Amino acid sequence: MYDNGYQAQAKWLADQLGISASDWAPTNQNVIHLGWGKITLNGSDQWHEAYRLDVQPEQQRIEIDAPDQAGALYAAQSLLQLKSGDSIKAVTLTDAPRFAYRGLSVDAARNFRSKEAIFKLLDQMAALKLNKLHLRLSDDEAWRIEIPALPELAEVGSKRCHDLSETRCVLPFLGAGPDGTEASDGYYTTEDYQAILRKADALNITVIPEVDMPGHAHAAIKAMEARYHKYMAQGDEAKAKEYLLTDFEDDTQYLSVQMFTDNAINVCMESSYRFADTVVSALVDAHRDVQPLSTFHFGGDEIAGAWTDSPICQSFITNNDTGVSSVDDLSQYFVERISHIAQRYQLDLGGWEDGLMHTNQVYPRSQLTNQQVYGNAWQNIWEWGVADRAYNLANSGYGVIYNQATHLYFDHPYEPDPSERGYYWAPRFTDTRKTFSFMPDDLYANANTKRNGAPITKKEVIEAATVKTLTRPENVLGLQASVWSETIRSDGQFESMTFPRLFAMAERAWHRADWEANTQNEKEANQTQRKVDYNLFANQLANYWFPQLEQQGIGFRLPVPGGMIENGELKANSPFPGLAIEYSTDNGASWQTYDAANTPHVSTPVQLRTVSGERVSRISKID
């Protein structure tokens, strides 16, 4: 039964339990009561997403109190996770999130993520009490969202094929081949996108669309060039130039990180801002009456020396009243224009950290008119990429989402092995333990090794940093993990790269562990306590969450076991205690369960794998 305002959450819980939901009647004592309640935790009132769960089996009564609908949903999630068969043990639990922003960004551009895959992901995010889905809808390699006023974006920008003119599609990338593939092609229709929004909204997950600009825009640029040529052929020059993003006389030579020579929208052309306004307007319309759009994420990252030899830009620099006096001023000019476009629709603005900075200088916050402007801080804790940009942005008045590539980018391999999928550009690997060990309250304390594996200390990192302290911690809004999809060509691979690492990220976003380092009280990390905590967490993954994921059809990754043969005796272990290990002495023809208490005597070679239900890990071999 539910109080007024909690109908949706009560119905969701009732559906999961196979019972019915109805209005609260105080005379009925044999019920689950889900209703409003003030939550106090550690002496402080908690108002957002908090809850209190009280299970009294002897009284056949369960009470859920929450100050908002999100808290009610999270209490219902906890109740389901405490359920064992048809019974739930007595428990009283009061809980509230550590951060207001707990997100995952999904790159649907490099390789497409189907609507069905996003649906499955949303269910898992809700179970982990994550509340933000940052959906990257455009990049150099593709455009993934229908914009009704600009059909060329979907017709041309969402497909890859061998067309040197790029008027039918964009050129093949990332294994697409001359005719494209199911993974490389595709986009969300307005109906698809709204279906995602409806499901997300029911699960207290806000969808934040990202359309990256002015860099990472090859697909959009080529789609608008195709539109230009179409209307020029019809003799309609005005319509051809209406949304053009290209100065055809621009001779600037540049090369992006991903080796593109033509991926920066020309920021000196009014048609570029007409394009941006049309895209934002379409997104606002798609969200309206489903989940009203609150934030537009413009990306802004990795602009590679564009516009220096653009005649249109040279003319604009010479003749403008906006304070632009050189090419170096154009990035800030663009961000200010995008800020005003978003503000016209009463939207907050998000961008990657480098989109809000130039030559390590933060753009003045006062020049951006949105109520909230935040940056995703991805810089790493080694070598050239110390984490001072995050502190710099927060100290300058911007909101900051910690999104560090060393710990929270899930396109990296789980371990440094050539058999593992993923890029090595930030760290050599990111396993579940590493993500679990991330300490948001002291970024520099996360220093461990450089990309090449050499050790690096917190002291060395601080010495290299320009901004050494965080003076405005209230501007740190939360954490986000990212799944970039250059090497992820199927929904199954996407799930394998995401799970189980997402569990570790969700743990740090919701809960501040006692072992974490903290700059506010100069506390150092307690390594012994962290090891104990991780072992408990890993055991829970193996014994509870992995069976749940398998039952729900999620293609999670199992770790490769370690092993050695000592005096003819096989010794093996797994990063997740309680996870079954199997070994084979006949090259995989048959498998036997490994028992650490009764270690087998074997002769080489031996193969090892971990097993959970029907899923098995990659096989390791001991010669």
Image (tube, grey):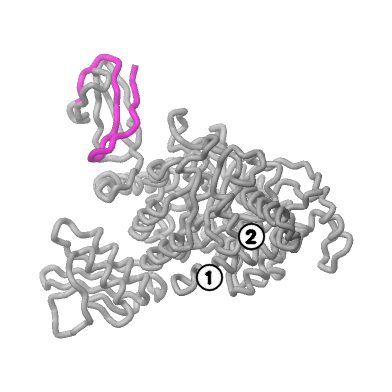
Work out whether 589 lies above or below 190: above
Estimate how packed mark 2 is, as few (under 14), some (14 to 19) or many (20 or more) residues with alpha carbons within 10 Å: many
Secondary structure, mark 1, is helix
The answer to which of marks 1 and 2 sits earlier in the sequence is 1
**Quarter of the image with the C terminus in it:** top left
The disc placed on residue 393 is 2
Secondary structure, mark 2, is helix
| Part of the protein shown in magenta | 599-623
- 603 to the left or right of 125: left
Are the residues tagged 1 and 2 within 8 Å (C-beta)? no
Residue visible at 83% across and 48% down in the picture: 309
Residue 503, magenta (yes or no): no
Image location of residue 36, percent across then percent down: 31, 79
Mark 1 vs mark 2: give the one in front.
1
Tell me the kind of residue under disc 2. Leu
Work out whether 564 lies above or below 67: above
**Residue under label 1:** 285
Image location of residue 512, percent across then percent down: 42, 58
Q: Residue furthest left?
A: 58
Residue visible at 52% across and 57% down in the picture: 145
Estimate how packed mark 1 is, as few (under 14), some (14 to 19) or many (20 or more) residues with alpha carbons within 10 Å: some
Tell me the kind of residue under disc 1. Asp
Image location of residue 363, percent across then percent down: 71, 62
3D distance between C-alphas at marks 1 and 2: 31 Å
Q: Quadrant of the rendered structure where residue 228 is?
A: bottom right
Q: Which of 612 and 147 is in front in this view?
A: 147
